[in-house]
Amino acid sequence: MSDRIADIHGRTALVLAADGPPITAGGDVPDIIGRTWGTGAEFVVIPAERLADDFFTLASGLAGEVLQKFVNYRLRVVVVGDIARHTAASSALRAFVGESNRGRHVWFVDSVDELGARLAG
């Protein structure tokens, strides 16, 4: 499977393939941003399994580094998938996810259907 452009409730998104290369460092992000430009995509949808475990350990700094790059380029990011094992292990991550989901730039959802519902309402 490869990355694709998708319409999600009237919004254009670059949906990364779940089986693509893992995002293990901030240096992995510019290529994704480059592929997004010119597509009209408002969102980059990242399957949770593409993110290194360090992403979910906030003390590593990886989540901040990766997400800030997208925000700097005015791209919204949606992490899609089950991250319950990570949030169960970290109250800081639970708080970060909750705060992110109240904002406009970074969201964590369980499925693309949940993202569509969120965009609808």
Image (cartoon, grey):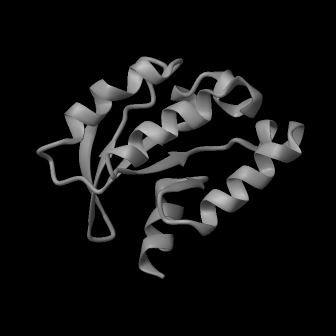
The x, y position of residue 95, in whole percent, is 78, 54
Viewed as shown, does residue 33 lie left or right of 65?
Answer: left
Viewed as shown, does residue 17 lie left or right of 104?
Answer: left
Find the residue positioned furthest to the bottom.
Answer: 121
Q: Quadrant of residue 8?
A: bottom left
Viewed as shown, does residue 2 lie left or right of 119?
Answer: left
Determine if residue 1 is in view.
Answer: no
Determine if residue 19 is in view.
Answer: yes
Residue drawn at (53%, 63%), measured in percent from left and top?
114
Residue drawn at (23%, 41%), measured in percent from left and top?
36
Picture quarter with the N terminus? top left
Tell me: residue 101, above or below residue 36. below
Tell me: residue 109, above or below residue 16. below
The x, y position of residue 68, in whole percent, is 48, 41
- Tally the numbered discs: 0
Viewed as shown, does residue 114 lie left or right of 94?
Answer: left
> Nearest the camera: 93 or 19?
93
> Nearest the camera: 116 or 78?
78
Residue drawn at (60%, 34%), measured in percent from left and top?
63
Residue drawn at (51%, 19%), measured in percent from left and top?
25
Tell me: residue 71, above or below residue 117. above
Find the residue positioned furthest to the front.
Answer: 72
> Nearest the camera: 106 or 74?
74
The x, y position of residue 47, in whole percent, is 50, 38
The x, y position of residue 72, in whole percent, is 38, 45
